[in-house]
Image (cartoon, rainbow, N blue to C red):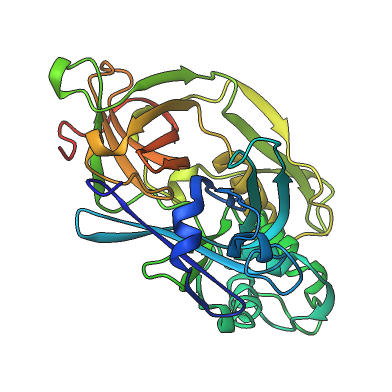
Amino acid sequence: MADGPQLMLLLGDTVPAPAPAAFLDALHGVRITSTSGATSGFQLTFSLAAGAPLARAVGPGGALYAKKRVVVAVVFVGRCHVLVDGVITHQEVHAARAPGASFLVVTGEDLSLLMDLRHVRRAFPGLAPHLRATVICAAYAQYGIVPQAVAPVLTDQPNPLVDVPVQAATDLAYLRATAADVGHVFHLVPGPSPGVSTAYWGPQRREGALQPALTTGCGAADNVTELTFSFDGLATARYGTYRFEPPSSTASEVVAPEPTVLRGPLAASPAQALCQRALTGQTGRTPNRALLAGLGRKVAADAVTGRGSVDVLRYGHVLAPHSLVGVRGAGAAYDGRYLVAAVTHDLTPDSFKQHFTLVREGLGADTQVVTA
């Protein structure tokens, strides 16, 4: 990869350091999957020779043993892109009779795994959900994790005299549950420099600068290997429930607000709700909490999904998840802006390919120009 992206591999315990050159020489392939609102995973494949330093690294205390920290980054066009910052969870050794044919596969998850190892029971009197998220994530500062929590769009301030929020789960499970309750997501974003990550608790980001456009159907200007789109007319639903407010004996309907109160639209024509579903599990909750729960269910589904792949050398950019990208050449219904919901990075010594998933709420471009 001397003419393209330059791979960086860091290993260690709490603070990772550059891996020995022998490890990089033996690294045959890297696969990393990053998904919005979910845990990222990685898989490293090494050539394995008897007596090599790599063979000793898989044992207890070795650099590739369970729970050891791994950072993978690439330097491309003068910029460092951190692809994953995580810990090892699994290893496999494939021993072969032929000399030089053995290999080692190391698998792991991003640093959010560390938040899912211990069940915790504690109270957060008087703390709103985003403040609870900040307190929890701050406990992992030794791993370079910086909290970034965004307040819910509707006020959800618990009264400590009548309602004390209690965590009875792992930190990760609680962070995701409280995020889903208000229409938010929780995930770690590695970077911008190796050894640093952002713990993002907030609405799905649907704003900001566009990454270079994914182009198809334009002849020599094409930069995608493949690109397909689908529209699910049943993805969008109307959520509501009924509440009794004493002293009235008549139930009033509570309907979840439109996702536009939480995020900006990406499509010119958002998909219309074809069905109505009950907003269950809201007994005893305040009206604002019921509205937030319904909002969370509405923003969790997008009607349009795009899937494809790119060769990074041809694309000229490392496509990043959790941010926006433009599409052109796919037709009037599917051109325009999308959220990059997931990216799988496949690196070998000779290539760097990415497989991606794009989402938005409807058809038609809301802009006439996308970034070239």
Where is residue 191? Give x, y as percent: 41, 66
Q: Residue at x 60, y 44 (%)?
A: 256
Where is residue 187? Give x, y as percent: 56, 58
Please state, as top left, top right, bottom left or bottom right, where the C terminus lies in the image. top left
Q: Residue at x 61, y 48 (%)?
A: 296
- In this rendering, position of residue 19 left or right of residue 349: right
Splitting the image into 4 quarters, where does residue 163 fall?
bottom right
Residue 95, above or below 57: above
- In this view, the residue in front, 308 or 84, is 84
Where is residue 63? Give x, y as percent: 62, 69
Residue 299, above or below 193: above
- In this rendering, position of residue 277 left or right of residue 350: right
- In this view, the residue in front, 120 or 14, is 14
Number of callouts: 0
Q: Can residue 270 be seen in this view?
A: no
Q: Can residue 2 be seen in this view?
A: yes
Splitting the image into 4 quarters, where does residue 238 fall?
top right
Splitting the image into 4 quarters, where does residue 279 fall?
top right
Q: Residue at x 76, y 83 (%)?
A: 160
- In this view, the residue in front, 277 or 47, is 47
